[in-house]
Amino acid sequence: MNPALATQIAVTFTWLGLVLGISFLEAPLKFRAPGLTIEVGVGIGRLVFRALNTIEGVAAVVLLIAVLAQGIPLSLVLTIAVIVVLGLGALVLRPLMDRRVTTGHTAERMPRHSMHFAYIALEVVKVALLVAIGVVGLATA
């Protein structure tokens, strides 16, 4: 297996594990912790997702370089799609949601907003794309 393909597979599945662990495990479970207020949970979530998005940005750059080095068109299309999804979530929706929380709304009286559901939908799409990139990589190996 060439180094670029090995990098594609490793980065893809590492990124997938981070998204599954944080977006679909940590984020919903944190609000079930006894004594944790919604406001504190939202504050923790903002910090965690900012860090996750930073790590995802690095993963996206490394993945793109690895995919470009291989010249596999399907991997490139899927990688560009996952980068677009990451950008929409990290650079568009998350800042809008952060602003909503910091503009005087208290988390206790703030109902879930359509932006939150859109972010979740983007995370689901991101997971599907990462699985596809990983499968293409494994099939190529």
Image (tube, rainbow, N blue to C red):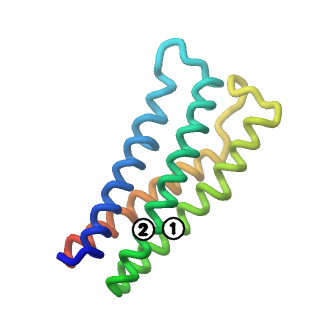
Taking 35 as reference, is 22 left or right? left
Residue occupying image coordinates x 67% and y 42%: 113
| Amino acid type for the residue under numbered disc 2 | Val
Q: Position of residue 98 (x, y in %)?
A: 70, 42
Q: Compared to 86, does 49 lie above or below?
A: above
User: Dot 1 corresponds to which residue?
Assistant: 83
Mark 2 or mark 1, which is nearer to you? 2
Residue 18: numbered disc: none
Horizontal and vertical percent position of residue 79: 43, 72
Extreme residue toward the front, this view: 3
**Label 2 SS:** helix
Quadrant assignment, res 24: top left
Q: CA distance from mark 2 to mark 1?
A: 11 Å
70 and 74: which one is in front?
70
Residue appearing at x 34%, y 69% in the figure: 133
Instruction: Categorize mark 2 by other alpha carbons within 10 Å: few (<14), some (14-19), many (20+).
Output: some
Mark 1, other Cα within 10 Å: few <14 / some 14–19 / many ≥20: many
User: Which residue is most to the right?
Assistant: 104
Q: Between disc 2 and disc 1, whose residue precedes?
A: 2
Mark 2–mark 1 CB contact (< 8 Å): no
Q: Position of residue 2 (x, y in %)?
A: 21, 78
Q: Which residue is mark 2?
A: 62
Q: Secondary structure at mark 1?
A: helix
Looking at the picture, tell me which residue is in the foreground, 94 or 116: 94
Q: Residue furthest top?
A: 35
* Residue at x 47%, y 19% (from the top left corner): 33
Location of the N terminus (image quadrant)? bottom left
Query: Which amino acid type corresponds to the residue marked 1 in the rendered image?
Result: Ile
